Amino acid sequence: MTYAIEVKGLSKSFRAADKALDDVSLQVAPGEMVALLGASGSGKSTLLRHMAGFVAGDCGDILVNGQVIQSRGRISKRVRGARAGIGFVFQQFNLVGRLPVITNVLAGMLPRVPMYRSLLRWFRRDEVEVGLQALAQVGIDGYAFQRASTLSGGQQQRAAIARTLVQNARTILADEPIASLDPESSRRVMDTLAQINRSRGVAVVVSLHQVDVAMRYCPRVVALRRGKVVYDGPSAQLSATMLRDLYGAELNELMPGAGVADDVDTIPLGGRNVVAPQLAAA
C-alpha cells in the first residue's frame, strides 16, 4: 500500500536539550482525515512543516504520496516536484491582499504553467473556469474578482483551501486553520475541509488546539506532547479522563473548562456521547 503520508523515526531539535520532535512515526492512508492535537509547543506545526519539506529533520524519513520528501534528515533534491501534490493551508491565509481572490486561487497552478505566464499572472479562460469552480466548491465564488483583503478571515481561509483544489493536491496539510477565526467561520472552514476529504478522497491532516473540533470532524486523532506521539487512534475513544492523563494541566488550553465538571457538556458524535465543550456556532 502506498500511504498518503509516511513518517519514520523523525526527530528535530532546535536547542540541544529541547526536542521539538522526538522519534515520530506515523502513517496516513489516502482519503483519511486526521487531527494533530496538542497544546502550544507540542510539535504540531513543526511536524506539518517537515511533511511539506519546508524544514529538514535531524534524522528520519518522510514520504508523501509515495514520493520522498526527506531521507535521513536531508530534504530530497526532488522535493519541489513532490510539493506539487501537497496543499498547505497556513494559519494566516498566505494570500496577497491587493490581488483579486481568483488570482490568489490560480496561484495553485503555478507549478504547472510556463514560467513566463506565472510571472505575468496570465491564465487561460479554461484555467480561470477551474478557479471559479474551486471557489464555488468552497462557497465563495461570488467574491472571485474582489481584492482578497476585502474578505473576512473565514472567507480568506476558504480561498486558501480553494487554491489547494486548483493545485490538484492529493494531500492537504492544514496548520491551525481556524486558530484566528470566530466560531461560525471555524465551522465553515472545517465543513469545507471535511467535504473535500469526502468528495475528492484527499487525505487531510489538520492541526488543532480544540478537542471538540477534532473529535467532531476527524475519525482519527494523533496527539502530541513535547514532540512525542502519545496517542494515535480513533477520536471516539478519547475521553476527558484520557486527555487529562495525556496532557495534565495543558488540557485547559485544549479543552477550556475541562477542569470544572459543570463547564463540560456531553455532545453526540457518531451515536456516542463524548465529554467535550460545545462548539458555539456548530
Image (cartoon, rainbow, N blue to C red):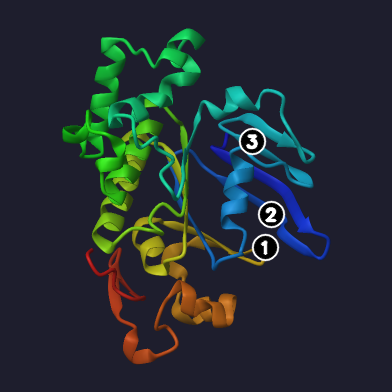
Identify residue for label 3. Answer: 63
Q: Residue 135, percent across and down?
A: 25, 32
Q: Amino acid at mark 3?
A: Leu
User: Label 2: which residue?
Assistant: 24
Image quadrant where residue 132 sits: top left
The residues tagged by marks 2 and 1 sit, at their Cα atoms, a distance apart of 6 Å
Residue placed most toward the observer, 128 or 250: 128
Which amino acid type is shown beneath numbered disc 1? Lys
Q: What quarter of the picture does the N terminus occupy?
A: top right
Q: Where is mark 1, residue-wise?
A: 228
Residue at the (64%, 44%) spot, across then down: 50
Residue 211 higher or lower than 104, as above or below:
below
- Residue shown at the point (57%, 53%) measured from the top left: 45
Q: Whole-Å distance between the Cαs marked 2 and 3? A: 13 Å
Amino acid type of the residue that numbered disc 2 sits on in the rendered structure: Val
User: Going by the image, does 77 lie left or right of 89?
Assistant: right
